[in-house]
Image: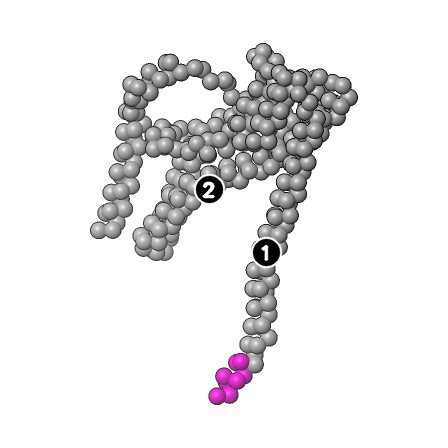
């Protein structure tokens, strides 16, 4: 009965995915009307890659996963940060899940051919665990990579603020300071800043508005604060050198605090192997004496 339930559930999920792929649900009329009357949003600054073998193999499963609300808004922001398209991510999740589901079954079939039977329970449980792991691992990887890139961007932003402050002190204008400072740096973070400023020039918009948009897409509020400060300088003529210096100092303090926290966390993680090693040493020393005492009873 359990086997019939498992196979029936798998068949039902497969048929549901096939029906959703062939006959996708139509959006409500109110949503379509709102799209017609909505003001067009600016084009995103962050670009996404839409290639790879996982996208080609998992393309039929993109629409069923999107229907159930995947990915979440937060995960969509993380995907934009690492430059990965939503279709690519959903296809990768489906491909890894199916691979994890099928691989133990194939191994079980090979063992059956070799006359080494394990029963159907163990391959079924292992297949479900592998499929669940393959479905969740891409999300975990995306979140970790996005946090790493945000930390890298904050580190580069601190240097960018110092460069802008120096150029403003030398008599440069706000627009010139933004462009000259970003041309000095290298790396992914400065590439995104240069891309934002080039977008501002091509679309004939103010650089601080595009920098604010980039801060929203990256979920780095320090960049949004920089855009607000530069906006005051560009529109109201406010002096922002002291404000930029304070923001740079705050970023450096946060980086130092994060580094100390990571070092303390690594130290705490090292305590467990030390305790296990000490316990193994005690067993190694005390086992002969305990064996002798038990043997003499």
Q: Is residue 68 visible?
A: yes
The crowd level at tag 2 (other Cα within 10 Å; few <14, some 14-19, many 20+) is some
Relative to the observer, which residue lies in front, 230 or 85?
230
Residue 183 included in the magenta stretch of the image: no
At a point 67% along the width and 33% down the height, the residue shown is 246
Q: Position of residue 290 (x, y in %)?
A: 53, 80
Magenta-colored segment: predominant secondary structure: helix
Give me the disc on residue 120: none
Q: In screen coordinates, is 131 left or right of 169? A: left
Query: What residue range appears in magenta?
Result: 290-297
Give the residue pinned by disc 2.
137
For the residue pair 192 and 261, the one nearer the viewer reads as 261
Examine the structure image and report whether residue 292 is included in the region drawn in magenta.
yes
Which residue is the extreme one toward the right?
170
Q: What is the residue that sits farthest to the left in this orientation?
A: 1
Mark 1 or 2: the one toward you: 1
Write down the residue under mark 1.
268
Q: Nearer the viewer, residue 89 or 161?
A: 161
Q: Using residue 249 as the reference point, say whether residue 293 is left or right of it.
A: left
Q: Earlier in the sequence, mark 1 or mark 2?
A: 2
Q: Quadrant of residue 249?
A: top right
């Amino acid at each position: 009965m359990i086997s019939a339930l498992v196979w029936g559930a798998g068949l039902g999920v497969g048929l549901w995915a096939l029906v959703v792929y062939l006959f996708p649900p139509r959006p409500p009329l109110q949503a379509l009307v709102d799209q017609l009357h909505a003001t067009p949003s600016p084009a995103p600054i962050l670009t996404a890659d839409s290639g790879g073998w996982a996208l080609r193999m998992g393309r039929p499963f993109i629409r069923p996963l999107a229907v159930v609300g995947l990915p979440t808004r937060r995960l969509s922001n993380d995907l934009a940060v690492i430059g990965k398209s939503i279709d690519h991510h959903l296809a990768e999740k489906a491909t890894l899940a199916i691979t994890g589901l099928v691989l133990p079954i194939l191994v079980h079939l090979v063992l059956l051919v070799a006359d080494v039977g394990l029963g159907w329970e163990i391959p079924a449980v292992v297949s479900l665990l592998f499929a669940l792991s393959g479905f969740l691992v891409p999300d975990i990887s995306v979140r970790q990579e996005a946090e790493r890139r945000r930390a890298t961007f904050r580190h580069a932003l601190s240097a960018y603020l110092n460069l802008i402050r120096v150029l403003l002190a030398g008599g440069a204008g706000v627009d010139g300071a933004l462009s000259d400072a970003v041309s000095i740096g290298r790396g992914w973070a400065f590439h995104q800043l240069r891309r934002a400023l080039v977008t501002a020039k091509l679309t004939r918009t103010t650089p601080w508005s595009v920098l604010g948009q980039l801060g929203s897409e990256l979920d780095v509020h320090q960049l949004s604060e920089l855009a607000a400060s530069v906006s005051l300088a560009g529109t109201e003529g406010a002096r922002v050198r002291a404000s930029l210096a304070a923001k740079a100092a705050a970023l450096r303090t946060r980086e130092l605090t994060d580094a100390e926290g990571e070092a303390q966390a690594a130290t705490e993680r090292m305590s467990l192997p030390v305790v296990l090693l000490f316990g193994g040493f005690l067993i190694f020393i005390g086992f002969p004496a305990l064996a002798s005492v038990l043997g003499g009873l």
